[in-house]
Amino acid sequence: MADKDQRPTYPLAPANGYHRSDAEYGREEDSGDLRRKKRIRYFLYFVAFVIFQTGVIAIFTLTIMKVRTPKFRMESATFDSFSVGTSTNPTFDIRMNARVSIKNANFGKYKYDNTTMYFFYQGSPVGQADIYKSSVGWRTNKKFNAVVNLSSVNLPSTAKDQLGNDLTKRLVPLTSMADLKGKVALTFIFKKKKAIQMNCTMEIVVSSQQLSNIVCK
Ligand SMILES: *[C@@H]1O[C@H](CO)[C@@H](O)[C@H](O)[C@H]1NC(C)=O
Ligand SMILES: *[C@@H]1O[C@H](CO)[C@@H](O)[C@H](O)[C@H]1NC(C)=O
Ligand SMILES: *[C@@H]1O[C@H](CO)[C@@H](O)[C@H](O)[C@H]1NC(C)=O
């Protein structure tokens, strides 16, 4: 009986001892491993945070802080008075209500100064309109009217000859140009100077008294 009892206990005792020392050794190894794993994990968190921050800054600079050039165009026009001559008496005297737009795609206001919009026929000035200093809100397409008197009075004779031809065709081509100086305010402190140009071509359709084919660069 004693032999039978001893046989199972004898190999168990040293086995228990081994187990204990094994477990203790293992625990020491575990806590070292754990610290290293924690350090790696924190390092990975830090790397992920840096990547995230870089992404946020990149998106911010590429969208919100990016300075886009506002667009200054002629949209349409109506005529308050309309008087044109003939191919033998080539003249025009037109009071035009020009509808212009300034499109600001920035995430900040665009403030601009006074300027003048000029109209040309065959490269010669035929009228001008004042544009008063104002501002366009962020991501806004501002539209407003500018009144201009178009007159052929000061045209040189070569242009007058051409006007005779154009009046036969009942189409008078014009160009409009303007330089606008202003600033884009992206934040309260960050402002960027942005000058924009208007450069449009259009046609006065004499028969219907309309302005058509407006193309702006
Ligand atoms: C802009 O035009 C208005 C009206 O003509 C004038 O009173 C004002 O002084 C001008 N501003 C600048 C900065 O030239
Ligand atoms: C256009 O002409 C009319 C009448 O001749 C005048 O009252 C008006 O002030 C002029 N407008 C411009 C912008 O020159
Ligand atoms: C306006 O555009 C025309 C072509 O459409 C170009 O030939 C001309 O040089 C431009 N003018 C300015 C002042 O940018």
Image (tube, rainbow, N blue to C red):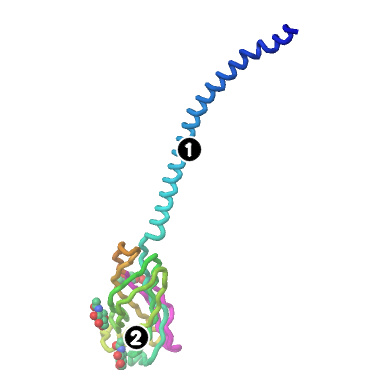
Q: Residue 94: give its label.
A: none
Q: Is residue 63 above or below residue 79?
A: above
- Image coordinates for residue 176, horizontal then vertical, percent: 34, 77
Q: How crowded is mark 2: few (under 14 residues within 10 Å), some or many (20 or more)?
A: some
Mark 1 falls on what kind of element? Answer: helix
121 and 18: which is toward the camera:
18
32 and 199: which is toward the camera:
32
Which span is picked out in magenta? 196-217
Q: Is residue 66 above or below residue 32?
A: below
Q: What type is the residue that disc 2 sits on?
A: Val
Q: Is residue 80 above or below residue 131?
A: below
- Residue pointed to by mark 2: 147
Q: Is mark 2 within 8 Å of ligand 2?
A: yes
> Can you tell which quarter of the image residue 162 is in?
bottom left
14 and 160: which is toward the camera:
14
* Ligand 1 image-quadrant field: bottom left
